[in-house]
Amino acid sequence: MSADPQSELIVPESTEPEKTGSTALRVITWFSVGIAVAAVGIYVGAEIRNRYRFKKRTPYDFYSNAGSQQASEFGVGI
């Protein structure tokens, strides 16, 4: 044993606890929140756009395809 008492002090290797699990969980949580916010934004934007388009229709839009003829025998092969 040496005469210097400070040289025999036990120093812990690391004073900070490991945070790898909590860091990964935090990243996954924030990523999920971001994806959820983006999905809600896309849904709300589509609803607003559909409502805006619905208000802009005229009475002629209801009958826009009244004169079109559909070929029902297409591909029959007679």
Image (cartoon, helix red, strand yellow):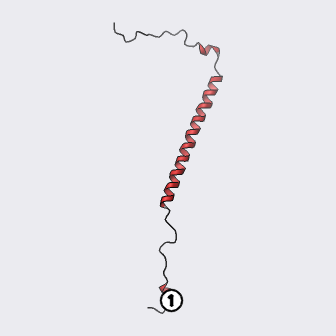
Report the label total.
Answer: 1
The picture places residue 34, in percent across and down from the top left corner, at 55, 46
Q: Around disc 1, counting alpha carbons within 10 Å, would you say few (fewer than 14), some (14 to 19), or many (20 or more)?
A: few
Question: Is residue 31 placed above or below 12 in the rendered structure?
Answer: above
Question: Is residue 23 placed above or below 73 in the rendered structure?
Answer: below
The picture places residue 65, in percent across and down from the top left corner, at 54, 13
Q: Is residue 57 left or right of residue 8?
A: right
Q: Residue at x 49, y 56 (%)?
A: 24
Q: Is residue 56 left or right of residue 4?
A: right
Residue type highlighted by circle 1: Pro
Quadrant where the N terminus sits is bottom left
Residue corresponding to mark 1: 5
Mark 1: which secondary structure?
helix
Q: Residue at x 48, y 86 (%)?
A: 7
| Of the pair 45 and 10, the residue shown nearer to us | 10
The picture places residue 70, in percent across and down from the top left corner, at 47, 11
The picture places residue 52, in percent across and down from the top left corner, at 64, 27
Question: Is residue 53 placed above or below 10 in the rendered structure?
Answer: above
Question: Is residue 73 placed above or below 56 in the rendered structure?
Answer: above
Q: Residue at x 64, y 17 (%)?
A: 58
